[in-house]
Amino acid sequence: MLKLIPGLTIVDSKKPGPIITIMAGTHGDEICGVKAFKKVIPNLKLKKGKIYFILGNLKAIKLNQRQYQTNLNRLYKDDSLIDLKTKQTYEYKRSREIMPYLNDSIALLDIHSAMDKDSIPFAICEKPFFKIAEQLPVKIISSGFTKMEPGGSEGYMFQNNKIGVCIECGNHISDLSDQNAIDAIYTFIANFNMIDKPAPQKVNVDFIYKTKINFKPINYFKDFEPIKKGNIIGYDGSKKVIAKSNGFILFVVSRRTSNKEAFLLGKYI
Ligand SMILES: [Zn+2]
């Protein structure tokens, strides 16, 4: 039994199977993974095995900054390769708390995001893991970091003959990185058959609203935004337009004239 550490959540199926680690907040201002943990962990039902969810740099996460004293993601390496000054840092201590969990796992996904506002989602891993990285929501898969930037979490796994993949989900604060972090977690876990492969939500469109006079939505609706029976969608002339059943809304648009398509409604199937 490993010593419990702060920032660790264990999701255990209580059935035999792989042990994997998923990390977020290795850099404290890269919060998409931190947010994804909150969404994914409470809903996760594993078929087998166990997952260690670890919030990496707790102090930096709290301060919403990249690091506290040094870069945590250069410290996953042998003590002999780390200088004395670095060994005094919080991050060094933290890396030594985390390493036993990496050692206990067969695979690691480490979730990051980037400062560049147009950052393209990409993966970092060594070549044997390209097949796994291909499943992730990325445009580029890059290798070579184990040598170029020693001490990274995924490189540490690789050097120990284990699977290590890092994902850069997109810009720090963006819907893209938030969604990619969630998708990456599910896809990575599915790779080990610990959950079923995530499938797209299936929906059916069953209602189209055409204007009597005109149409003005009550507010902005996202495509596929959930909607409840009785919700006001907007106004046609002076008359309220109300959802007649639960489901989702799609393609909402203001219209100035009659007999124009103003929105669609549908249901999840
Ligand atoms: Zn990072």
Image (tube, rainbow, N blue to C red):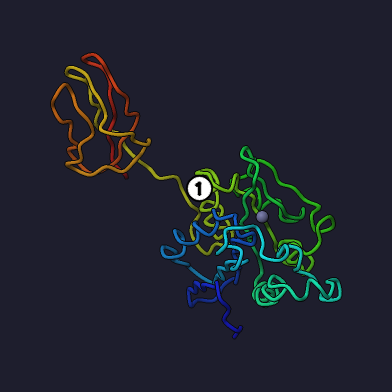
**83 on left or right of 73:** right
In the rendered view, tell whether residue 46 sits above or below residue 167: below
**201 on left or right of 140:** left
Which residue occupies the foreground of this view, 242 or 87?
87
Which type of secondary structure does the marked residue at label 1 adopt? helix
Q: Where is residue 251 in the image (x, y as percent from the top left)?
A: 35, 29
At x 64%, y 62%, the residue is: 26
Badge 1: residue crowd in 10 Å (few <14, some 14–19, many ≥20): some
Quadrant that contains the C terminus = top left
**84 on left or right of 97:** right
In the rendered view, tell whether residue 232 sits above or below residue 103: above
Q: Where is residue 129 in the image (x, y as percent from the top left)?
A: 71, 55
**234 on left or right of 125:** left
In the rendered view, tell whether residue 157 sits above or below residue 119: below
In the rendered view, tell whether residue 244 sits above or below residue 25: above
At x 44%, y 64%, the residue is: 44
Which residue occupies the foreground of this view, 165 or 4?
4
Give the quadrant of residue 157. bottom right
Give the quadrant of residue 214. top left
Residue identified by numbered label 1: 179
Q: Position of residue 190 (x, y in %)?
A: 54, 58
Name the kind of residue labelled 1 in the image.
Gln
Q: Position of residue 191 (x, y in %)?
A: 58, 58
At x 23%, y 34%, the residue is: 233
